[in-house]
Image (cartoon, rainbow, N blue to C red):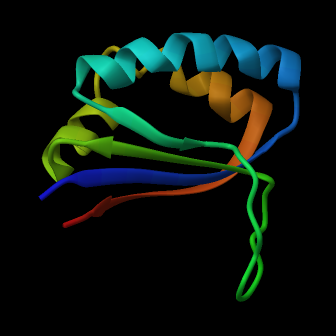
């Protein structure tokens, strides 16, 4: 089963966040990840969608998504995101 990272993000410091975007992509690719959604136009159809940016990344497996998130490659990149945005995020098994 594929694994998905789904994040709903509010970027607080867009200029500094650009550094994260530039550094995270190679780490995602190294673990076989593929961006399916990076921001984009949307319409809320039920409930509340708290933040304006949504990201969906597909990995070959759920385990590969977890491996990426806990990897030495992502470890120095993650603090850039945390310092410049707030988010709700999950890693979930897909079909």
**Rendered residue at 36%/25% (across/down):** 28
- 94 vs 87, left or right, is left
Q: Quadrant of the N terminus?
A: bottom left
Quarter of the rendering containing residue 68: top left
Q: What is the x, y in percent for residue 87?
A: 67, 51
Q: Position of residue 95 (x, y in %)?
A: 19, 67
Residue at (63, 18) in percent of width and height: 20
Q: Is residue 76 above or below residue 89?
A: above
User: Where does the image place residue 53, in percent across and percent down from the top left?
Assistant: 73, 48
How many marks overall? 0
The image quadrant of residue 71 is top left
67 vs 91: above or below: above
Foreground residue, 26 or 69? 26
Horizontally, residue 95 falls left or right of residue 47, namely left
Does residue 70 show up? no
Which residue: 56% across, 52% down?
A: 7
Could you tell me which residue is drawn at 15 percent across and 47 percent down? 61
The extreme bottom residue here reads: 46
* Residue 47 relative to residue 88: left or right: right
Residue 34 x/y as whole percent: 35, 33
Q: Is residue 62 above or below residue 36?
A: below
Residue 79 visible in image = yes
6 sits left or right of 40 in the view = left
């Amino acid at each position: 089963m594929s694994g998905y990272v789904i994040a709903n993000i509010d970027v607080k410091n867009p200029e500094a966040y650009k550094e994260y975007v530039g550094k995270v992509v190679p780490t995602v690719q190294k673990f076989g990840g593929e961006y399916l959604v990076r921001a984009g136009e949307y319409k809320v159809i039920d409930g509340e969608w708290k933040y304006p940016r949504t990201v969906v990344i597909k990995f070959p497996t759920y385990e590969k998504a977890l491996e990426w998130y806990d990897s030495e490659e992502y470890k120095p990149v993650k603090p850039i995101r945390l310092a410049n945005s707030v988010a709700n995020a999950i890693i979930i098994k897909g079909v």
